[in-house]
Image (tube, rainbow, N blue to C red):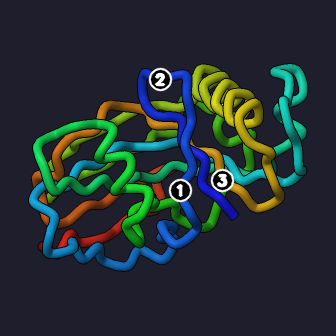
Amino acid sequence: MNIIVKPYGSDRCYCRPDTTWERENRDFYSPECVNMIFRTPVLFARISKPGKCIGEKFVSRYYDAVGYGMLIYCSMDDYARDSLIAFGSCADHTSILPQPLYNPAVLENPDNIFEIKEDGTTSYLCSCGAVMTSVLHDAICRASKMTSLRIGDMVAVELDEMLPVKGEHIRAEYCGNEIINIRIIR
């Protein structure tokens, strides 16, 4: 199982191994060598049918569930996106893609809100709707051109730039349900 990520503002994708997947809201223990931690919100889908070079018209046939989450990137040096991606792809428990997942139809409702809070202060907020479905479909199409999608893979699309994590306690809600509740232990 891979986590295929389409970075914010990029047309390319990269893969994270399943060792980065955190689905149980365990706290994140920062490795000693890390001096900065970044986070970015993601929308993701679980692939339910294998495929390669999937066309836009057929994307909805290839996933059965969606969710919102967050990716963590660790830095040992000054901010350099490529080194953050490389290191983030190796660090355990940095792909926070919580369970349970939602029916894709939930994504269409613009009244559903995804919100991330750091130490009680909102740091990211977005509403759902057809735009989010389009963003997700584009990411799945692009990912399937680069790699073969397998049942159980996750395709995640970053929704915002990487920003430094300022707080110690990160919570996120979607559809009025708490989906993330972790502490960053430095």
The quadrant holding residue 107 is top right
Asked if residue 122 lies left or right of residue 53, the reply is left
Mark 2 = which residue? 10
Distance from Cα at disc 2 to Cα at disc 1: 16 Å
Label 1 Cα neighbours within 10 Å, binned few <14 / some 14-19 / many ≥20: many
Residue lying at 58% horizontally and 28% vertically, measured from the top left: 132
Image quarter hosting the N terminus = bottom right
Q: Position of residue 133 (x, y in %)?
A: 66, 28
Residue 135 vertical placement versus 91 (above, below): above
Residue lying at 46% horizontally and 53% vertically, measured from the top left: 69
Residue lying at 29% horizontally and 45% vertically, measured from the top left: 83
Of residues 11 and 118, the one drawn nearer to the viewer in this rendering: 11
Asked if residue 108 lies left or right of residue 19, the reply is right
Residue type, numbered disc 3: Met
Mark 1 = which residue? 16
Image quarter hosting the C terminus = bottom left
Q: Position of residue 42 (x, y in %)?
A: 47, 43
Distance from Cα at disc 2 to Cα at disc 3: 18 Å
Residue type, numbered disc 1: Arg
- Mark 2 and 1 residues: CB-CB less than 8 Å, in contact? no
Q: Is label 2 in a helix, a strand or a loop?
A: loop
Residue lying at 90% horizontally and 39% vertically, measured from the top left: 61
Residue type, numbered disc 2: Ser
